[in-house]
Every structure is written in structure tokens, then in C-alpha cells.
Image (cartoon, grey):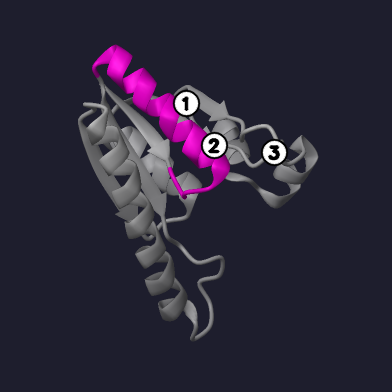
Amino acid sequence: MTIVLGYDESPGADRALDQAITLAGQLSDRLVVVYGAAPPSMMGEEYGAHLAALSEIGHTALTAATEKARAAGVDTVVELTEDKPAEALLEAAEKYDARVIVVGTYGESPLRGAMLGSTPHKLLHWSHRPVLCVPPPERA
């Protein structure tokens, strides 16, 4: 089985990475680390430049996450897609028959997440697989 992780180097995603590595190690599952690089808007001439920049950021993030997971002895696969994050995670979960989707949260209010369409909020409503939402670290 597999565990699908959404990763973008945010504090919540870093905590989610740690949880996903621990869970994958305990269950002897493969970890699929996903980054959806779709720009916020698909309109305008800036789209190509935004996509290239987000893809480069995603590549860097996925490399760091993969190194950490492999150092912990977890079999890891990378998925860098041109989809929006929630869609990328749902697609990867289907492709790899994921046991669970793991994502970090950003500490925003539930109302703000619902109104702005946060990735964890979308996954909780769209996914037919379990979703583990990991909160960001507490502020010092």
C-alpha cells in the first residue's frame, strides 16, 4: 500500500512529512510525495512563466522531502504535476491506491479555509480515502 503526501515546504507540510515518514515506516508502505504546480490562474501570458517557476520550486521541495524519507528507510516516489494541489493529490491517491492522504494545514480558521478553498478543506470534502490533516507547529 501507499501513503500520499502533499508537500510544499511550509511549516505544516514539514510536520506532515514527519508524520507520513513515521506512518510509512511503521506500515512498511511506500510514500508518494506530491507537488501540484498549477499557477493560481490559467489565463494570461504569465501562465508559462508561473508554471515554470512553480515547477522549479516543487522540484526543490520534492528533492528535500525525498532525501529525508529515504534517509529514514522509506521507499519514496515523487509526483510533480501541473495540476492544482488538491486535484494532484486525489489523482496520485487513485494512481497508487493510497491508504491515506497526508497534508499539512496552515493554521487558518475553518471559515477562511472554506471560503478560500484550502487544499485540506477540499480533500476532506472530495476524497473517498482517509485524509490526515497535520497542524503546523505551535508558535513559540
Instruction: Decide if residue 96 is in sight here.
Output: no
Q: Which quadrant: the C terminus?
A: top right
Which residue is nearer to you in this view: 137 or 36? Answer: 137
Pinpoint residue 65: horizontal percent, then vertical percent: 34, 43
Residue located 51% across and 25% down the image: 132
Which residue is nearer to you in this view: 11 or 86? Answer: 11
In the image, residue 50 sits, relative to residue 124, either above or below, namely below
- Amino acid type indicated by mark 1: His
Pinpoint residue 120: horizontal percent, then vertical percent: 58, 37
Mark 2 sits on what residue? 104
Residue located 34% across and 58% down the image: 60
Mark 1 sits on what residue? 128
Q: Is residue 13 toward the left or the right of residue 96 in the image?
A: right
- Amino acid type indicated by mark 2: Gly
Cα gap from disc 2 to disc 3, whole angstroms: 9 Å
Q: Residue 16 magenta-drawn? A: yes
Does label 1 or label 3 sit earlier along the sequence?
3
Pinpoint residue 44: horizontal percent, then vertical percent: 53, 83
SS majority, magenta = helix
Mark 3 sits on what residue? 107
Outermost residue toward the top in this view: 26
Specify the segment rendered in magenta.
7-28
Of circles 2 and 1, the one toward us is 2
Pinpoint residue 66: horizontal percent, then vertical percent: 28, 42
Crowding at dot 2, Cα within 10 Å, few <14 / some 14-19 / many 20+, comes out as many
